[in-house]
Image (cartoon, rainbow, N blue to C red):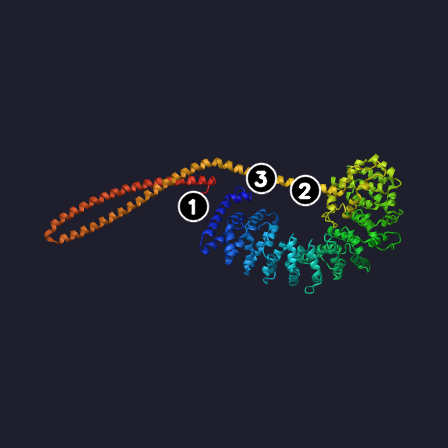
Amino acid sequence: MAYFRSFFGGGRVENDEEDGAEIVEKMVERAETCTALEDRRDALRALRGMAKKLRLAVGTMGLNVYMDVLEKERTNQELTFITLDILVAVLSSDDENIDEDELGERLAEVMLKKPVFIPSLLAAIDDYDVTVRRVGIQLLTSLLRHRGPEVQAAVMVQPTGVPHLVDIVHDRREVVRNEAILMLCELSRSNSQIQQLLAYENTFVLLLDIIDTEPLDSIIIEDCLFAILNLLRKNAMNQQLFRENNLISRLGTILNAFLYDTEEEPDNSDWVKQRSANIIFLLQVIRSLVSPDNAVTNTHAAQKALHQTKMLSELCRVLLSEMGLPVEVLTETVIAVAEAIRGNYTNQEYFASTSLITNENLTRTSLVVLLITMTAEKQPFKMRCAVFYCFLSYLHDNEFGKTKVVETLLPASQPDTAVSTGSLICQAITSGESVQCWFGCVALLYCLLDVDHLREQLLRVQLSTTIDHPPISLVKHVSNLLVSMGNRRVQMRAGVLMLLSTWMNNCPAAVASFIENEENTHYLTTQILDDCGEGTESEQQVLKGLMAFLLLLCLQSSRLCRSSLEQLVDRRVGREVITGAVEGLSRTEQFVRAAQKPQPLTKTPNELFLEYHFIKMFKASEGAQLLKMLRPTGEFNGITSNDSIIQSFKDLIKRQDEEIAILKQEAKRSTAQIEQLKQENDKTELEHEIELLKKKLEESRAHNLHNDTVQIQMQEMYRVNEQWRGEAAKYKQWAEQWQQYQISQVCFVAWLAVNNLLFITHWSCNTGANFQELDQLKAEQEDLLILLADQHKKITLYRNRLKELNQVVTDEEDE
C-alpha cells in the first residue's frame, strides 16, 4: 500500500479510506488464496462494489489477480466479466472531464506495463458472450482515452489486432456494435498507420451502412461520422481512397436525407439538437476533404467531385434558402461552401452564378447575400465571420472575380438603385461599427492582392457620403477616416491601415495620392510615437508596426518625393523607431493568431485585428529590399526576416515551456520530499512511544494468559466439587437403604443403628471439609475476576491509544 501511495502522490488518507483499503486487501487475499470458485467470485464481486469509491486501492492491490484471471481463466466467462468490469470502474471517473482524470491515466499506465494485459484483453473481446465482449470493448475505449498512443502501439503489435476490432462492428447486437463504434472513434485518433489500416478494412463503407439504417436523430450517426472524420482529417491516403471509392456521393445522399426527409413532418423549424449535431458532423466530414490544410491535389480533386455529385449545388441551395435551419448548422454550411470553392475557379463561378429571389421579387446574387449578412449587426458574430470567410474564399486565386468586384465600384458600372458587391463593401468601410468596417477593409484589400492593375483602377473610385458634399476619391476618404479616428478605435484603424498598406504596395500612383495630403504623413509620424492611445499594449504595438510598414511602402514606391519623405521620417521618428515598430509587429499575439489559418478563428469581435493573407504579404515585403533607402548610406539596420523572428520566438517559447516543465517537476519532487520528511519526523517521535505501548501490550497479554489459566483451574475445581457432591449424595442414599435394611433385621437392629450412625457421622465430616474448600475457591475466584476486570480496562486504554497513534490493531488484539 505504501508503495502505491507514494507512486501516485497520495498523502495521508482518512480513517474510512484506511479501513476500506484494509477490506480491499482482505478481498484480494481471498481472491488469491481461496480454492472454491464461489469464494473467489464473491471476493471479486465485493471488489467490484468498492471499485468506484476506492479506485486506487482496488486498481493497484488486485492488479495481479486481475491479470491472472484474464490470462489463465478466460474460459470462465463470469469471472472474466467481473474482472473486466472492475477495471472499467477504476478507470472511470465521476467527473465528466476525462482529460483531467490523473488517477485514471496513471492506473492505465500501470495496467499497460503488464505484458499479458493487451493480448488477454483482445482475447476477451473475441469472446462472443455479449457481457464479456461489451465490457471488454468499454475497457479498451477507456484505455485509449487515457493512454491512446501506448494502446495503439500495443494493438498494432498484435497479429490481426486491427482487423479483429473492425470485425466487431459487424456484430448484429446493437449494444455491442455501438460500443465498438465508440472504440473506433478513440482508436483512430492521431495515428496515420492505424487510420490507413482501418480504411483498408473497408471501415468507411461499414460506417456509412450503419448510418443508413439509423434514424436521423440517432447519436450513433454522430459517432460514425466522428470516426470517419478522424480517418479523413489530415490523412491524404484515406482521402484519396474515400474519393476513389465514390463515397462522396453517399455523403450527398445522407445530406439530402437530413434536409428533405419525407418520413417526418415537414416542420424543420424546431430541429432536434442531436439531429443538428449529426448534420454539423456531416458538414465537417465534407470540409475535411476540401480543407486548405490538405495536399493541393487532394483538395482540388475533392472540390471537383463535390461539383460533379451536385453536393455543391445542394450546399448553395441551403445557404440561400429559408429552410429554418439552426444558426449553427447554417454557419457550418457557409464554411463548407467556402472551402468547397476556395481556389477552384469552376466552383467559384458556379457559386457566383447562384442567386436568391427575395419577397419583393428582387434577384440577389449569392455574393450580395453574403455581404448583406456580413454587414448586418444583428446577425450572430460566428455567422458574420463565416460569410466573410466565404467571400474571401470566392476571391482566392480568382483574378476575374476580383476584377468584377472592383468594376462594381467604378463610375457608371451599375444603376444607382442597384445593390452591388462594391456598394456593400463601401458601406461597410464607412460604417461606424468597428467589426463591419474591419470586414469591409479586409474584403477590399483582398481584391487588390496579387493584382497590381486593380490598385490603379481603384483610384478612379469616387465616394459620396452625404448629398451636400461632392464625391471624393476612395483613397482620400479612407485616409481622412484614418486621420479622423486619432488614437481611438483600434480595430477600425487596424483594418484601414491594412487596406492602405496593400493599396500602396507596388503602386506609385496610390502613394502619390496618399502623401499628397500632408496630414496623412503627419498622422503616421506622430502616432508611431504616441503611447496614450486606446487598446492594450499589444494592440498599440500592432498599430505602430502597421503605420511603420505603411511608411516604408510609401518610401519604396515614391520616386519623386522619396528624399523629402526620408528626411521627414529621420527628423520626426528616427530609423531605429521604424525598425523596432516593424519588428515588434511580428512579436504580437495578434500576428501569431492571424498567421495560423485563413479562416478567422476568433471567439469575440475584439479579437479581429490582423488578416492571414495580409500577414503573408507583410512577410514577403518585409525583406531587405523594402527596408533599404535609395541613397547609398540610407539603410535600416537591424531588420531581420519575419521567418527568423517567428522561429526565434518559437525557440524561446519552447525553451520556456521546457523550463516550466522542469520547474514543475522539481516543485513536485520538493513537495514529495517535504511530505516524506514530515512523515519521517512524525514517525521518529512516535516510534519510541509505540515501542513502550507494545511492551505494555505484551505484559497485558501475559497477564491475560495467566488469568485464563486460573479461570480454567477454577472451572476444573468446580467440576471436582460437583463430583464430590454427587458422591456424597450417593453415599447418603446408600446409608439410608442400609439403615432400612438393618431395621428390618430384628436381631441386628441395635448393631446396625450404631454402625449407620458412625458411618453418617464420618461422611458428614468429610462433606463439611469439602464445603469449606469450596468456599475458599469461590473467594479466590472473585479476587481473580476483579483482577481480570482491571486488566481489561488497561488493555482497552492501550488499544485506544494505539489507534490514536494510527497503529494498526488486528482483530486478534480486539479479542
Q: Examine the rendered structure and indicate whether residue 166 appears above or below residue 546.
A: below
- Camera-side mark, 1 or 3: 3
Q: Examine the rendered structure and indicate whether residue 367 appears above or below residue 673.
A: below
On the image, numbered disc 1 is attached to which residue? 811
Residue 296 seen in the current view: yes
On the image, numbered disc 3 is attached to which residue? 669
**Residues at marks 1 and 3, CA–CA distance in whole angstroms:** 38 Å
Amino acid carrying label 1: it is: Asp
On the image, numbered disc 2 is attached to which residue? 654
Q: In which quarter of the image is residue 586?
A: top right
Along the polypeptide, which appears first: circle 2 or circle 3? 2
Q: In which quarter of the image is residue 168?
A: bottom right
The reply to whether the C-beta atoms of the residues labelled 2 and 1 are less than 8 Å apart is no
Q: Residue furthest bottom?
A: 263
Q: In x, y percent, where is residue 430?
A: 82, 47
Q: Residues within 10 Å of mark 3 (few under 14, many from 20)?
A: few
Residue 357 seen in the current view: no
**Image disc number at residue 735:** none
Along the polypeptide, which appears first: circle 1 or circle 3? 3
Amino acid carrying label 3: it is: Arg
Q: In x, y percent, where is residue 14?
A: 51, 43
**Residues at marks 2 and 3, CA–CA distance in whole angstroms:** 23 Å
Residue at disc 2, secondary structure: helix
**Residues at marks 2 and 1, CA–CA distance in whole angstroms:** 57 Å
Q: In x, y percent, where is residue 713?
A: 30, 44
